[in-house]
Image (tube, rainbow, N blue to C red):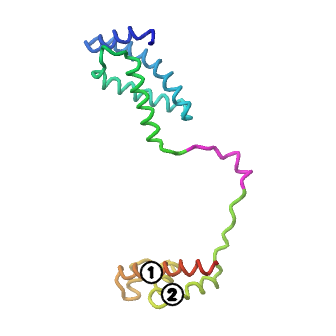
Amino acid sequence: MNEREGDWAAWLAAAEAGDASSYRRLLEELAGFLRGVLRRRASAYRLGADDVEDALQEALLAIHLKRGTWDPAQPVGPWAATIARNKLIDSLRRRGRRVDVPIDELAEVLPAPAEDDGLTPRETEKLIGVLKGRQHDVVKAISLDGDDIRSTAARYGMSEGAVRVALHRGLSALSAAYRSFRE
């Protein structure tokens, strides 16, 4: 058990009775204790000092809000450490599973991405030639000419919904044709 446990319990009991100076002293003492607890736990997760300080502030706020849940028959340290640990876990959950890896030094070592040759104009015409009728017209107008749905619908006397359907079906057919074209 922590040697300061008796003082913490006395200060928390006095704080519950309205003694502001005891409460201030308790929070100052707990801040130092919890900072050490959080640093040890944070190092295992490769969290920085800023993450530790954020978790500490959240823990102190939670202790303030939950001070009525402390059981005077129990030690203050483990109760406060559990709250701090939970705040650190909350921080890790918010952070997600991302891993920060600095790549500045690796830029010269990694190979450059391969240039995408894409399709030649002749290959594009051949590929789009697999489409017939309205699908051909709609895909060409929207994908190659850059027209929008509304103007394409007006040009071909179709509803906007019909243009979207023709575009979707045409692009699906092109996708299948492209896969067989590249194989």
Which segment did they paint magenta? Answer: 99-110
Find residue 151 and report its image quarter. bottom left
Residue at image point 44% right, 36% down: 91
Residue that mark 1 sits on: 169
The amino acid marked with disc number 2 is Leu
Marker disc for residue 131 = 2
Q: Classify 10 Å Cα crowding around label 2: few (below 14), some (14-19), many (20 and above).
A: many
Location of the N terminus (image quadrant): top left
In the rendered image, the residue lying farthest to the right is 109
Point out residue 168 in the picture as x, y percentages from the top left corner.
44, 78
Report how far apart the C-alphas of labels 2 and 1 lie in the structure: 10 Å
Location of the C terminus (image quadrant): bottom right
Q: Main secondary structure of the magenta part?
A: loop
Residue at image point 41% right, 31% down: 86
Q: Classify 10 Å Cα crowding around label 1: few (below 14), some (14-19), many (20 and above).
A: some
The amino acid marked with disc number 1 is Arg
Number of residue marks: 2
In the rendered image, the residue lying farthest to the bottom is 133
Mark nearer the N terminus (2 vs 1): 2
Magenta stretch encompasses residue 106: yes
Q: Nearer the viewer, residue 20 or 77?
A: 77
Q: Nearer the viewer, residue 57 or 157?
A: 57
